[in-house]
Image (cartoon, rainbow, N blue to C red):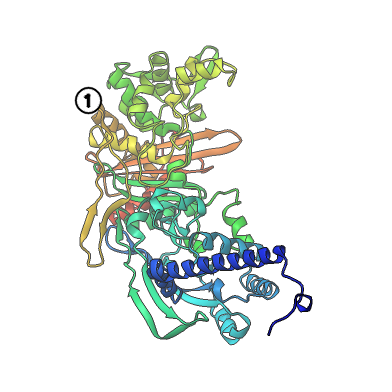
Amino acid sequence: MYLRSDERGPAVSNRLALRIALFGGIAVVLFAILFFRLWRLQVLDGEQYLAEAKNNRTREYRVSAPRGEILDRNGELLVGNRTSLALQVNPRKLPEDPAERRAELSQLADLTHSTLRRVRRTMREELKLAPAAPVTLRRDVGHFLVYYLQENQDRFPGVEVQRVFVRDYPNATLAAHILGNVGEISPEELKDPRYKDLQPGDEVGQDGVEDTYDGFLRGDPGLTRIQVDALGQPTPNGRLVSKPPAPGESLKLSIDAEVQAAGEAGLASYGSGAFVTMDVRTGEILGLGSSPTFEPTLFTRPLTQKQVDETYLNPAAPLANRAISGLYPTGSTFKLITALAALEEGAISPTDVIVDGGSITVGGQPFQNAGGAALGAVDMARALEVSSDVYFYLLGQEMWNTGGLQRWAHKLGIGRPTGIDLPVPAGAEGLLPSQHWRNQLYEEGGTDRPWSVGDNIQLATGQGDLQANPLQMAIAYAALGNGGTVVTPHVGKEVTDAAGRVLKEFDPPAQRQVKIDPESRSVILEGLHDAAQSPGGTSYEVFGGFPVPVAGKTGTAQRDEQADQSWYVILAPYPDPKIVTAVTIEEGGFGAESAAPAALDILEAYFNKHTTGPAGPNGGSPG
């Protein structure tokens, strides 16, 4: 129908037409983008997203591997494994509502004797490195808690209890300082190349051989992959992959459980102290202990505050391994080193006689025997037998400005790292005082005087600024006993697989060879033998009736603000020693009063022999 111009509506404005065209263009562009995006998702990236979708339907769980067993040299079990229950949280199954989630985690914290803050920190740290893995809140949970959680499963969604392996110690505290303990890997340790394949929640050795030989003991974790539904629940027949864990390899130590037990019992009878028993030729440690000790089982479960206080804050330091890091003056046990240095440096001959009048005065300062006893004419062997301080004071005076005493002490391992295959704290090498050391200290203002002859006199009898540990003394005596080999002490003997096949043996080479004149060795051993088993010897009361010939030396060390420290170092059998034992007892008195009887217990266990009876009165110096 034709309309006149005055009958038509208003004409569409140019502006409106522009808007319609613009919106239409935008719509076309958006449609094109959406089309391209869908095309890319389905065609170009389809396989990638299909794989991710499949991954969302699966869950992977690491299965911890049992650590390898630790055995003594005769195959006796020292550390094994037991199954334990671990409380785990699956964050995907926790309530989505923040308030409900907080309430559940707070209840879990109360049930596990923890705090909400600690629970959240644990979850945050573990999820940061392993987002898909359940978070372990606590190991070794009790059955009562398990039953409670099972009965109230609807109140604790996402909470699971899994069986895991936990270290088991059938002999309680035996060899605790050697064995060490395991613990959950820390964030700092995860950055260590040693642990590059581990994840939060994995356990690693934290001390002792558990740390040193962790790479052998740890094993390889297994893997379980299961299929889940949209709610994250396992589907029927949902297990897709199951790779069992590979157990760690077993570690056989050089320790003899009977020798170890005898040494620890001897220490416990007298108080704080340490002992070492070692093969003088190979450096194999047969026993090594420190008192007080601790229960390794403590570290298999969370510690209460009381246990933390008793273990970490205890002034008696039960975690400290005094055998390898306890630093003390050694008293007269150092006289073996002084004797060897004097003979090899030409300061005296074995037959030279000195008249011991009970004391000497040097630079206006008196130095006297213990108790002021005058021991008369003594040569080298006799001086060792009766522990004549005056004899060795004079040797220290003779060598005070030559450095000969320090040279030989250094050769034999005093003031040097021992090389043992156990974690050793910094500074455990101790201090071998010397003219250079004190003079430098004096120049720096660390002491009020330079080196003097009195310092060397004190060192000659194991006093003054000397700081040594029992293992160092055992190494020094072993070098004399074997003719000059400074051995590398070690507790690791071999690694075996599940079938008992030896995979690796540990036989570290000697640290060095020291040339010792056979005559010097012979006269010193003779003096030590007489000290132990001749009437009048300083430890005759203890070893006079022992059926195996031995050569031993007592030591009584003075320490500031403490009672005398007891020492005893012994080589057996005499004259061709196989083992050396060094014992020290803090505030134990004379060497023959506590350290020597403890050493006797060890030798009786090693030789499976007992003393024939009391040896009679001791006529010598207390040493």
Q: Nearer the viewer, residue 271 or 304?
A: 304
Q: Where is residue 233 drawn, in percent x and y? A: 49, 82
Side of 558 relative to 211 (left or right): right
Q: Quadrant of residue 524?
A: top left
Residue shown at 42%/79% (left/top)? Answer: 227
Using the rendered view, name the quadrant where residue 96 is placed. Answer: bottom right
Q: Is residue 501 left or right of residue 163?
A: left
Indicate the quadrant containing the C terminus: top left, top right, bottom left or bottom right: top left
Q: Position of residue 503 (x, y in %)?
A: 22, 57
Residue 517's image quarter? top left
The residue tagged 1 is: 517
Work out whether residue 379 can be spotted: no
Give SS at disc 1: loop
Neighbour class for label 1 at 10 Å: few (<14), some, many (≥20)?
few
Residue 603 is left or right of residue 109, and the answer is left
Identity of the amino acid at label 1? Answer: Asp
